[in-house]
Image (cartoon, rainbow, N blue to C red):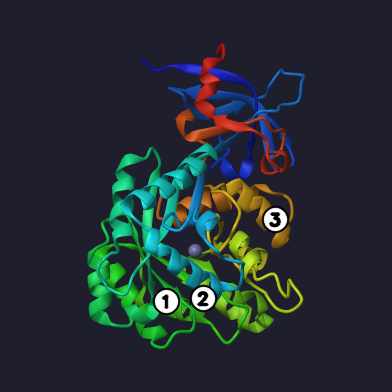
């Protein structure tokens, strides 16, 4: 039997609604306030509210952690590491791998996943460092087991060197080890054989039906432009899976004409960019007088050029970033400060919800039509309130209230 309920005085961000047909209420900024209509505990509409008090209950979709490293997280406490740039962090983290037993990897990954779930995440993509061999490292096997055990959608992405992927046999062997639903990726930072490596990665992802996810141009050195090569290969091949590129730091320093050309290619190829302010702020721009530069991709300009933009946490409490936690709202707050993401804020909320989902090859899952089990409810009156740290919990708790 179909059930109908109404929950009084709820605020929803219009950018996350996914169609406003059947939603009538009071508009305040980029949010809508009214009485929420449910059918079989799914959100189906809104009607004007008789409530006099302003709403301090905001509904939003479960969050997405689009880019993190569960194999490396929570290792800083055992490292004798005094900071440095990306190269220093890579070396320190490599030394820590001597301690990576199955139990250690699993324990730290579950710590990271628990943080993400507590932060409201319903899906996570973690990159996994590859070794010298094409066959998967033990950490990948352990994390594939973790995928089966956790109450959250967890995708893994290979983090090989693009120079390794330039060897067709290596690329094929690595791709063959990736189960359906996960992603093929590579670290792209001006290496020799970069174009061949990117082309092989595309070809193998296409053959295996995998998503693509690159770490690219994590540097302020504008001589490095792997991002445009990725866009060119995407356009040449017509790859039809999802493509996500992380960092794209040097893009922020390019001349306007170069930026316009690259952004146009990214938009045409349907490539999404995930900015990772936490790690970029910590590792980039290190010189005698710190900080030298912010090291962030130009999110606002990319969005205006029609490129889908996403925000992720990246490294948590490891050599790449000694602090932090897996919390997309925190990544967004940091992005607002460091990348000058201006109000209205609803469009930026998409970068950790609906747009982040499609960048991972998932459906957008906006509020309209969603089951309350997949949504969150916050003690927040507007999006600034939510992003600034308002408490939130599973929206299914609304069903414990007396319902109309
Ligand atoms: Zn990363």
Which of the two residues, 222 or 349, is positioned nearer the viewer here? 222
Ligand 1 closer than 8 Å to the CB at disc 1?
no
State which tag comes first along the sequence, 1 or 3.
Answer: 1
Q: Which residue is located at x 70 percent, y 58 percent?
A: 341
Label 3 and label 2: CA atoms lie apart by: 25 Å
Q: Which residue is located at x 71 percent, y 74 percent?
A: 293
Residue 76 to residue 196: above or below: above
Disc nearest the viewer among 1 and 3: 3
Residue 52 to residue 30: above or below: above
- Residue under label 2: 265
- Residue under label 1: 235
Q: Quadrant of the N terminus?
A: top left
Numbered mark located on residue 336 in the image: 3
Label 1 and label 3: CA atoms lie apart by: 31 Å
Q: Is residue 30 left or right of residue 120?
A: right
Please provide percent x and percent y for residue 54: 76, 25
Label 1 and label 2: CA atoms lie apart by: 8 Å
Say whether marks 3 and 2 touch (CB < 8 Å).
no
Residue 59 figure quarter: top right
């Amino acid at each position: 039997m179909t059930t109908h309920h109404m929950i009084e005085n709820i605020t929803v961000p219009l950018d996350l609604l996914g169609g406003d047909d059947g939603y009538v209420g009071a508009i305040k900024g980029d949010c809508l306030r009214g009485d929420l209509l449910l059918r079989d505990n799914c959100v189906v509409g809104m009607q004007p509210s008789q409530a006099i008090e302003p709403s301090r209950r905001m509904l939003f979709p479960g969050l997405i952690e689009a880019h993190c490293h569960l194999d490396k997280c929570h290792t800083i406490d055992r490292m004798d590491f005094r900071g440095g740039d990306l190269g220093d962090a890579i070396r320190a983290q490599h030394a820590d791998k001597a301690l990576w037993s199955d139990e250690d990897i699993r324990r730290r990954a579950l710590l990271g996943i628990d943080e993400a779930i507590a932060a409201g995440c319903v899906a996570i993509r973690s990159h996994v460092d590859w070794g010298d061999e094409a066959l998967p490292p033990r950490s990948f096997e352990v994390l594939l087991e973790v995928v089966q055990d956790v109450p959250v959608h967890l995708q893994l992405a290979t983090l090989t060197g693009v120079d390794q992927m330039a060897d067709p046999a290596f690329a094929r062997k690595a791709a063959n080890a990736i189960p359906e639903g996960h992603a093929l990726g590579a670290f792209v930072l001006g290496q020799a054989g970069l174009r061949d490596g990117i082309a092989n990665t595309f070809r193998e992802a296409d053959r295996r039906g995998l998503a693509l996810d690159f770490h690219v141009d994590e540097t302020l050195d504008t001589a490095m432009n792997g991002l445009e090569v990725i866009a060119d290969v995407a356009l040449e091949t017509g790859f039809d899976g999802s493509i996500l590129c992380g960092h794209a730091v040097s893009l922020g320093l390019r001349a306007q004409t170069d930026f316009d050309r690259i952004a146009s290619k990214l938009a045409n190829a349907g490539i999404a960019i995930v900015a990772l302010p936490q790690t970029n702020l910590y590792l980039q721009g290190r010189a005698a007088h710190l900080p030298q530069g912010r090291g962030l991709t130009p999110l606002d300009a990319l969005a205006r050029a029609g490129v889908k933009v996403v925000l992720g946490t990246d490294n948590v409490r490891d050599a790449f970033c000694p602090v932090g936690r897996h919390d997309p709202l925190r990544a967004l707050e940091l992005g607002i400060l460091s990348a000058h993401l201006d109000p209205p804020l609803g469009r930026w909320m998409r970068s950790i919800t609906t747009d982040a989902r499609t960048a991972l090859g998932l459906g957008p899952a906006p509020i309209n039509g969603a089951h309350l089990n997949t949504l969150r409810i916050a003690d927040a009156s507007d999006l600034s309130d939510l992003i600034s740290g308002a408490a939130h919990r599973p929206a299914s708790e609304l069903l414990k209230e007396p319902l109309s």
